[in-house]
Amino acid sequence: MRTMAAAALVALLVFALAANARAEEKNFGVGLMVGYHNFVRYEAVAGPNSNGILDDGEIDRAVGSGAFNGFTIEGDFEYRFFPYFELGGALQWYGADASVDTITEKNRVRGNFTVSVTALTITPRLVLPLDPVRLYTGAGIGLYWRVMDTSFSVLGENDVTTSENNTDSSGQIGYHVMVGAEFIVTPWLGVTLEDRFAFVHFRGQDPVTNLDDGDFGGNSVLIGTRFHF
């Protein structure tokens, strides 16, 4: 009887160890993250020059003192080829509202705009597996789709003021770099922290204000969960 009980205990232990080993060998993961996005859109200046006149490109007022901030959400996946290398993909959205007072060419422009960007990216990543943390870094490429709504009053030559409302949408290829850490809670669940910087330039469609021509990448700080299968 004792022999049978000992054999059953050994079999149960072997089964548990094998199951744990299989769990740690999970190669596929999916995740969901939310966070903060900072558009690095303008070169910040304190205000007009001492003569009280804004020069071309100077910003008198903008949300975030030269940049503007918003919300981001992302769904992603990863496939681990080796313990130190994996391939990740993501679908990210980020957006924000901003108020602007600026000089563009011969016009002074005051108004608001709303911008949203959807990015489909792919990222080869190097991984440093530490127990219970996985550190990773990578760089990749993506397709970025921007939708921008603008509402402006334009003070032109001879003090002629006009108003305009525009909606512009366009796509562009961009690049990004990132670092992150995943804290392993269970073999199938992790908590992720990630920082990413994207570089993407959109050509403007508005010849009057020219505010839709510029960099609409920026920095994303994200937190979320990842499930492993």
Image (spheres, rainbow, N blue to C red):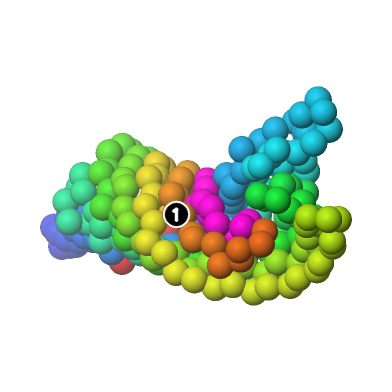
Amino acid under label 1?
Val
- SS type, badge 1: loop
Using the image as rendered, state which of residue 165 and residue 28 is in the foreground: 165
Image position of 128 with respect to 214: above or below? above
Mark 1 Cα within 10 Å, few/some/many (few <14, many 20+)? some
Locate the C terminus by quadrant. bottom left
Q: Is residue 116 left or right of residue 119?
A: right
Q: Quadrant of residue 133?
A: top left
Q: Is residue 152 left or right of residue 69?
A: right
State the count of labels.
1
Q: Quadrant of residue 129?
A: top left
Using the image as rendered, state which of residue 109 and residue 138 is in the foreground: 109
Q: Is residue 221 visible?
A: no
Q: Which residues are magenta?
A: 210-223
Image position of 206 with respect to 185: above or below? below
Image position of 193 with respect to 224: above or below? above
Point out residue 210 in the picture as x, y percentages from the top left corner.
61, 57
Point out residue 115 in the picture as x, y percentages from the top left corner.
63, 63
Q: Is residue 8 visible?
A: yes
Point out residue 47 in the picture as x, y percentages from the top left corner.
77, 33
Residue 83 belongs to magenta span: no
Question: Who's the residue at 26% across and 52% down the image?
Answer: 124
Q: Is residue 118 left or right of residue 139?
A: right
From this viewpoint, which residue is outermost toward the top? 50
Point out residue 116 in the picture as x, y percentages from the top left corner.
59, 65
Question: Who's the residue at 44% across and 69% down the image?
Answer: 171
Locate the N terminus by quadrant. bottom left
Question: Who's the residue at 68% across and 73% down the image?
Answer: 166
Residue 211 belongs to magenta span: yes
Residue at the spot of label 1: 200
